[in-house]
Amino acid sequence: MKEAIVLTLLAASGVHSRNNGVGKLPVMGYDTYNAFACDYDGALATAQAKAMSETGLVALGYNTLILDDCYTLRERNSSGFLQEDRTRFPGGMRNWTQSIHRYGVSASAYSSNGHKTCGGYPAAYGHEDQDLEVWRSWGWDRMVKYDNCYIPYDNITMENEFGRFKRMADAIDRLAEKYDEEPFVYSVCQWGWENPYNWAPRISQGWRIDPDVKPYWSSIASIIYLQSISYQATNFYQHGDMDMLEVGNNGQGMPTGNLTLAEQRTHFTAWALSKSHLLIGTDLRNATNETLAILTNKELIDINQDPHEGAALAPFRVGSQDNFNHATYNESYPAPYWAGNSSYGAVFMIINTMNETQEMGFNLTENWAVRAGRKYNVRDMWKHQHVGVAIRNWTVSLGPHDVAALLLTDAGPEPAQELADGSLAPPCALPLLALQCASSNGSYVYSG
Ligand code: GAL
């Protein structure tokens, strides 16, 4: 009874919807936009699901597919319903959904919070419940990606960004309650305008932090920079969305990409360890072994999908490599040193943002998840092997724009006072804490 009253009050407050508090891991799957923009049909989309299944991607968790924009006719019918495009989806949408279900892939929806989608097709503003019912009738059941084009005037919405995007969150809740089904995952695509990390976590499970990703290093670097100023909003229930993957888009993609393999590794590592959705955006019919090796990095996927730890990695030094003591935020040279925790051990991500090879050293105790006074086994999650034992410090050599993804597990107390290079270790963790480091009789180790 008491519970019923609380629920009624929450519902009446209009803020606590069923979406809130529903734990959702980042979504893994495929999105048509980076590979094809509007230039696709049902057969091409099904071919991606087939490739996902045949290459083992579905088994790894990439198991939903978003038709991103442009999948209906250009006009609603006279009753306001979305109309199927029987030229591009000849058997109709329900049949198309079944064609991907055969490969173990579910279907997810795209629409926009305005009069039209960004590609100029009918969008769900004012038709939220109606469109959700249509998607459901087509067998779509996983996620709604909700874009931000062609927004109505303020005198129609009479809402701010939060209220405007809450309309779809509420409609998703109504649908789930009506049929007693799992709610769609709600993913807000507002391009990081108006700091969505401040408000989108109240109504959604994901929010884009960036304008559209592009298959160039400058774009990947700038999104990693944006993540460094918004990572705190990500938790087990909701995720900053760094946008769809461009892995595989060297010589292909829309626009045609030029990402080196090192850049693709860095891109995938940063997205996975930031707990972003992992939505493939390349034509998988042409996927090379190198592309598949990146997309199937199970060690990184396991951390992205960690059932117990929801926080994203945090930068422990900001600014560019040559000036890391100062917060010199720079979109071209995002934070190179990141760390966090996982169910499998402490996690470090080191990115060489510079254009030449670098030796990059760091102190383990800069990360809260590593205990001072202990040594650590270091596993390289790209080499997929144990690479040594770290005592206080670790150094990696990285080529231009390449990354190290390291998993550290406890290997016992560190040897007394000895650093890897043979010098004496400070008895307290570096750097500022050393100033307060004292013996039990109260005398400071460092005076002056
Ligand atoms: C953009 C959005 C892209 C894609 C595109 C479709 O606004 O950021 O991810 O959905 O619209 O037209």
Image: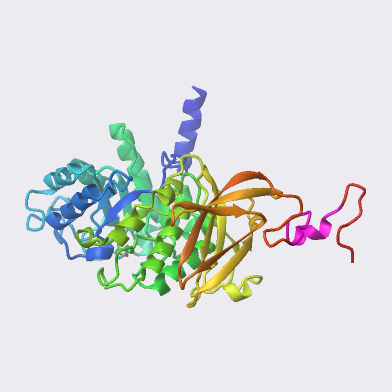
Report x, y in % for residue 150.
30, 65
Q: Who is closer to the viewer here, 446 or 227?
A: 446
Farthest residue to the top: give it: 1
Q: Who is closer to the viewer here, 36 or 6?
A: 36
Q: Who is closer to the viewer here, 134 or 233?
A: 233
Q: Who is closer to the viewer here, 384 or 181?
A: 384
Q: Quadrant of ligand 1?
A: bottom left
Residue 369 visible to an observer of this rendering: no
Q: Is residue 434 magenta?
A: yes
Residue 167 visible to an observer of this rendering: yes
> In terms of image quadrants, where is residue 418?
bottom right
Q: Quadrant of the C terminus?
A: bottom right
Report x, y in % for residue 22.
43, 39
344 over 352 or under it: above or below: above
166 sits to left or right of 439? left
Residue at (52% x, 42% y) in the render = 343
User: For the stretch drawn in magenta, what is the main secondary structure?
Assistant: loop
Q: Which colour style is shown?
A: rainbow
Farthest residue to the front: give it: 422
Report x, y in % for residue 227.
49, 62
364 sits to left or right of 433? left
> In terms of image quadrants, where is residue 23?
top left
Residue at (64% x, 56% y) in the render = 364
Report x, y in % for residue 327.
62, 70
Residue at (40% x, 62% y) in the render = 265
Magenta region, residue range: 423-438
69 sits to left or right of 443? left
Number of labelled discs?
0
Q: Is residue 323 magenta?
A: no
274 over 101 or under it: above or below: below
